Amino acid sequence: MTALAHVLEPWHRSARATAGLYGHFIRLAFLKYLAYRLRYYTGVISYTIFVSGYYYLYTALFESRVPGPDGVATMGGLTVQEMVTYIAVGWIGRSFYFNNIARELMHQIQEGQIAMQLVKPFDVQAVMTFEAAGESAFRLLMFTLPISVVIVPLFGINLPEDPALLGWTVVSFILSLMVYSQINFLTGCLAFYMKNISGVLRAKMVSADFLNGLLIPFSFFPEWFQTAVGFLPFQAVGYIPVTIYLGKRPGNELWIALGIQAAWAVGLYLAGRVVWKRSVRTVIVQGG
Amino acid sequence: MQLEQRRQRTLAASIRWQMGIFGAYFAQFIKTRLAYRMDFFVDTFGVMVSIIIQLAVLTTLFGKVTALQGWTFEQVLFIYGFSLVPLGIFNIISVNLYQFADRYLIQGKFDRVLLRPVNTLAQVLCESFNVSGLNEIVLGTAIVIWSGMRMQLEVGALDVLAVLVMGPTAALVYLGVFLGITSISFWIEDKMGIAPPVYNVIRFSRYPLTIYSLPVRVLLTFVLPFAWVAFYPASWFIGEGNLHSVAALTPLVGLVVFSGAVLLWRRGVANYTSTGS
């Protein structure tokens, strides 16, 4: 009887085995994307095209701006050189933290594979988060580094004056990955309630790039809109790391910024748990 | 017997016959989509949000300057709106091109296409439509009209005719470029290919060409001729006078690009060997 209870007790694992299990998913995701690495070569070209497009748009914009009393045109507190850096670092970071968890979750729910995920002895949200980490580890090597090698010299991007800021930018982008993967997980959970969320995903992607600050720095926005985006998690994805790189967060502001990111990462993870628990109850898998 | 009768049809009759078939294709497609009515609204939502974001970007940027290298807000908006119309037309008919290499060549659906006595290209294009492209056409037109009214453009009958000709022929530029790229997959088997980076160059066509450096302008005019999608045709209405006659070349460019792609497609079809599946 006691032996049977032992068998039935769910997920009876040592902490080490659990760590090993989830660590395995990082490795698996890395290997999975390694098989598709060819796709990322064209991605390098695409990202260079994105950055070039905004480079031309913003340089034209700064040239049309009336210069300040010191003869330098600034906008939203940025010079044209800082603006180009802003765009380049923003897109380089995006090449690292980006993932498609929401779409994956949608496919699993639509095709009923979610049933198999639910049967297995692990926490689906944690697995997807670790897979996102594995994907990003892959992207860092095969995507972010090649892109940096192309974009940094092409647009003459300078390192931050204080080299330590480079390190903090990296830390900040890792937190971006956490926030972004949880936003995606929550969006993917919508597929429990709607059959087709591809339009929602498309809307989310473009609006996220906008609300991230990837397309336009927040400091360009009118006051009321800056306040509004300050309440959203998206600033923790794109805007904070780039402003850290540019040295716009001196002293204590750096710690506050990183704290905001960490708080969103934890908060959204917990929200994801709650939503997941509720949503799973609604699942009906037909056959399979 | 029937085959011989078909051969004797005149060109006009043949075109009418083929058009009837593709009308039926479209009717069938609409019927299958009606089963998923919600999808249309969900996709519409996606398109609307991306257009609203783009308008927000332009509005924010023009909050900082009075003109973008001499181009006013209304002029830039006019070009952006104009670019949406060919994009919408292109999006409606081109969904199958994107997946062509994978679905038709690798999975072997192209064998079936070849067995039918109808134009192969038209079959591939008409087997699937992306109805949400209608949103781009409608919203693009609305943006063009709104910015045109703000600029107090005087529009005559000739101008209306010009738009009606230039809009669809500008879409031929998109279609031609991507058909050309798709045709390459007859020789090089590659699931994704070079289409995504080229697709991303489309965004360059939203803004006035003069903001780009000379090499980029040459590229967009002659190599990936996306400048003919919005900037040149829109210059019929706006900007310096010396580009007005250039705008009239749009239909020619569209036809040349598209014809070149069709020739490449035909060679590709002749070169096709089935995977046997």
Image (cartoon, helix red, strand yellow):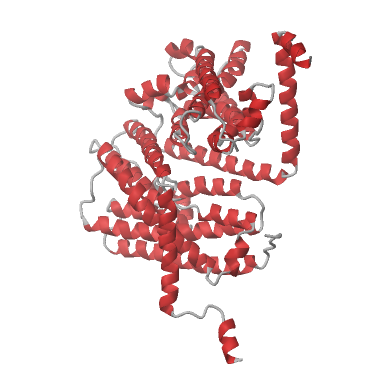
Q: Give the quarter of the figure containing the N terminus of chain B.
A: top right
Q: Give the quarter of the figure containing the C terminus of chain B.
A: top right
Against A162, residue B162 (above or below) is: above
Against A272, residue A215 (above or below) is: above
Q: Position of residue A202 (x, y in %)?
A: 55, 45
Against A29, residue B183 (above or below) is: above
Q: Position of residue B26 (x, y in %)?
A: 72, 30
Taking depth in this image into account, of B132 and A107 the one nearest to the observer is A107
Confirm whether residue A90 shows in the render.
Answer: yes
**In the orientation shown, which residue stands out farthest toward the bottom?**
A1
Confirm whether residue A178 shows in the render.
Answer: no
Residue located 56% across and 23% down the image:
B269
**In the orientation shown, which residue stands out farthest toward the front?**
B276
Q: Quadrant of residue A252?
A: bottom left
Q: Position of residue A72 (x, y in %)?
A: 25, 37
Q: Position of residue A274 (x, y in %)?
A: 57, 69
Taking depth in this image into account, of A122 and A92 the one nearest to the observer is A122
Residue located 60% across and 61% down the image:
A114
Image position of B209 (left or right of A204): left
Image position of B107 (left or right of A168): right
Residue located 48% across and 57% down the image:
A232
Task: Report the number of numbered marks.
Answer: 0
Taking depth in this image into account, of A286 and B49 the one nearest to the observer is A286
